[in-house]
Image (tube, grey):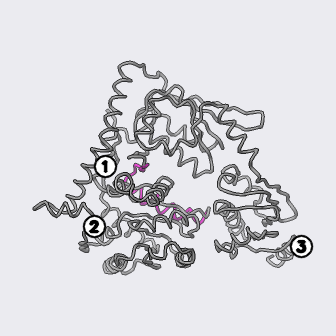
Amino acid sequence: MKTIFPETAVILGIPIDNLRLEQIIDRMFKMAADYETDGRPRTAVAVDLNTVVRLYSGSRRNEDYEEAIVNALRQADLMIPTGRPVAWIARLVGTRLKEKFSGYRFFTKFLNTAQLSGKNLFILGDDSGDIKRAVEAIRSVRPELKIAGTADFDSSRAGKNSYRTWLLEKINSAAADFLILDLRDPAIACWFEKYRYRLYVPLSLVIPDISRFIKAEGKSFQKNRGIGHRIASMIPGFPPYIAKNFFYSSLLFCFTIFPLTMYQQYKRLSYRLFRIRSPLPSIKSRVSKSGKGIALRIITLPDPLDASMAEEIRDELKELVARAPKTVLDFSGVNFIDSSGLGLLLSLWRTAASKDREVFMIGIRPPVFRFFSLSRTLDFFEKNMCESIDDVIGVLSRRSDSSSFYYLAAIRGNAAIFHMYGELDASRVKDINVNSVLETIGRRNAVLNLSGLDFIDSAGMQFFVRIQRHVTRRGRCCIMYGLREYVRQMFTILKLDRMFVIADDLDEAETALENQL
């Protein structure tokens, strides 16, 4: 029987990319290279057992920490499974990883590749002194590896905006290729969640413990932290690190993994005994258009949505989701879903997010809803769950009616002039066809009239950054004019005013354009 390796594994709501070590390293450096093309900073997360435990066991003592970490993990572009315990847990919930590798092996491979390719690192961690030891360990083994800079996060000043922006500027000015973040300190997690879209670093690598870098370089690092180490020290002759993982694994299995595993096996057995499998492992797709011109790609999912079915329809589904601005997944015929089907859904969500697409779900039956809840992914999908197609259209219609953002484009000589109106935030950015905007600009200069723009947030800023990078790569320039006071302040606060030529009115913009040429 052929072994099925799902593309994405899901461990208690955390999507894990099921790739071999070589594939992970290649993807990391490709994402860093893609930054030069699209200007979008990306995030990779090294997930080990401690990360999972802190998310769903100990982290509930600090809600800010939990929310920041969960958001950082679920929105990451690459989730890296490190350590055998993670592979064991994945196997228990029904997913076999393609390759098991330790955090030491991953970090060693990453540092080797960074040194050979001439990339530089910036390391951010807590103020325990681990950063200094990590840099000393790295330099003693790899003197040619470039360290662009380091920073010890000062938790006592974390609440001050001046300190946060200072840290952001320090990292951005270092011009690093990779930002390494040790998220043991909850304040670092909160800072990263708030500012990660304002980092001008191609790839941020989130790690659970900076001491892994030291161990990866063959240096000893002994520092007891937490109850796991204290319990481990009470076990004669048992290595502390192994005892700690064994203790955490047992708790995790008893309180979280075991109920999920039993429920999944029970539902699979019930399905096989009382239901007939869908004879055709294919999906049905159609396009629906409302009277308001809202076009939806509706995909009817097969039953059951398990490992074999998910693998057969994965590529087709991802292609459909990538092409359609709005996709609706119809679950009305799905009575059973397992971890592989859940991994497919999370993979689709990440594909849609990376291409500014949106996915809705309708017809969720109670067994599927309970599985989402038990696997702790319900909050991930819940905001996009609707009863029917009419409900989805109603949501989009209300959003369209309440949306105050729109733009008008005009070609004038060698410049594309865009007049922006209303409020540009994350919800509106999703509805913008950015590729269409860039195609309109082509190889022309871009002139942006923002006199009608009332509000903008960091997501809206990324829209303008993409325009600026598009014209710059083609030897053209991007000029803004008519900025209102609030919008101008946002550009100043985010230090983006240095990226654009800003004028007061159209005449000044045309003069600036002539000077640029």
Does 378 sit left or right of 248 as displayed?
A: right
Check disc 1 and give the amino acid type: Ala
1 or 2: tag closer to the N-terminus? 1
Q: Which residue is mark 3?
A: 507
Residue placed at 33% from the left, 80% from the top?
Answer: 136
Closest to the observer, 238 or 472: 238
Of callouts 3 and 1, which one flags the residue occurring earlier in the amino acid sequence? 1
- Numbered badge on residue 87: 1
Find out whether the residues at labels 3 and 1 contact each other: C-beta distance under 8 Å.
no
Q: Which residues are magenta?
A: 14-37
Helix or strand or loop: what does disc 2 sit on? Answer: loop
The secondary element bearing badge 3 is classed as helix
| Residue 462 on image: x %, y % | 65, 62
- Rendered image: mark on residue 225: 2
Label 3 sits on what residue type?
Answer: Asp
For the residues carrying marks 1 and 2, which lies nearer the camera in this image? 2
Please name the residue shown 35% across and 69% down the image: 210
> Does the segment drawn in magenta span residue 23?
yes
Q: Are marks 1 and 2 in contact (CB under 8 Å)?
A: no
Give how far across and how far down residue 49 sits, in percent. Answer: 32, 55
Separation of disc 1 and disc 2 at Cα?
Answer: 24 Å
Quadrant in which the C terminus is drawn? bottom right
Question: Where is residue 138 drawn, in percent x and y?
Answer: 34, 76
